[in-house]
Image (cartoon, helix red, strand yellow):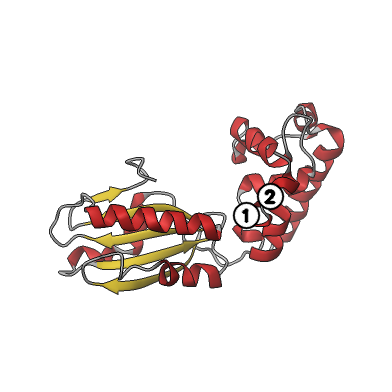
Amino acid sequence: MRIKDLPKFARPREKLIVRGVKNLKDSELLAILLGTGTTSKNVLVFARQVLKKYPLAKFLKLNFKDLAKIKGIGPAKACIILAAQELVKRGLAVQDETLPIIRSVKDVIAQAVYMREKTREHFMVISLNGRGEMIYKRPLFVGSLNANLVHPREVFQEALQRNAASIVLVHNHPTGNPQPSQADLTITKRLIEAGKIMGIEVKDHVIITKTAAFSFKQKQLI
């Protein structure tokens, strides 16, 4: 599939313009720098494959010779990549305020640790930018979860306003049993589908108790 055949919200350049550069994935940023892919792969697919072979930390250490040897990059694109890297290095004399990065279930729990001691169910949405940094968190509901209470409109409201790339759902089980209920499964599925329509990924849904946690992502339910 060619880039122009993708919906506009999925095209890297259009996504950058509408949602901001911080909300692009590493592969999308690289795709913009590369400009074009290969005869058999569009630039987004090609960028993903490059970063799969050379994870970001390793990719950023490649010199001109190494980059130019990668089939599909070559000398011209290698120059663009290295110039962009150097420009960023020179501009980092002033650092932006560091945002907490959500990489694991432990990171999620750290943002919702207060829920462990609650005697009623609490539901929170954590909004992330394209780098996995938390840009906002908002407790939404208190009480037993059901489809009527957890409506996609409220769940995605802040994420849309803040141009989030993805969200993480969190709620607690005061009973001490972290296993998801049928209502939890139904609500999560509904929100995942809603997120696909809006172009905002539901990265995980974490259920926490006083002593345990359950991750939908880890259990391959997302």
Label 2's element? helix
Question: In the drawing, what numbered circle is on residue 29?
Answer: 2
According to the picture, the residue beneath numbered tag 1 turns out to be 24
Query: Based on the displayed image, in which of its 4 quarters is residue 82 positioned?
Result: top right
Residue 113, horizontal then vertical, whole percent: 28, 63
Name the quadrant containing residue 188.
bottom left
Q: Position of residue 77 (x, y in %)?
A: 82, 39
Q: Quadrant of the N terminus?
A: top right
Q: Estimate how packed mark 2 is, as few (under 14), some (14 to 19) or many (20 or more) residues with alpha carbons within 10 Å.
A: some
Q: Nearer the viewer, residue 117 or 179?
A: 179
Please give the name of the residue rendered at 69% of the width and 52% of the height, measured from the top-left corner. Answer: 12
Q: Position of residue 201 (x, y in %)?
A: 49, 54
Mark positioned earlier in the residue sequence (1 or 2): 1
Q: Which residue is depicted at the point 39% across and 65% down?
A: 125
Three-letter residue code for mark 1: Leu
Q: Image height check: is 20 above or below 32?
A: below
Kind of residue at badge 2:
Leu
CA gap, disc 1 and disc 2: 6 Å
Taking the image as drawn, is residue 205 in sight?
yes
Q: Residue at x 56, y 57 (%)?
A: 199
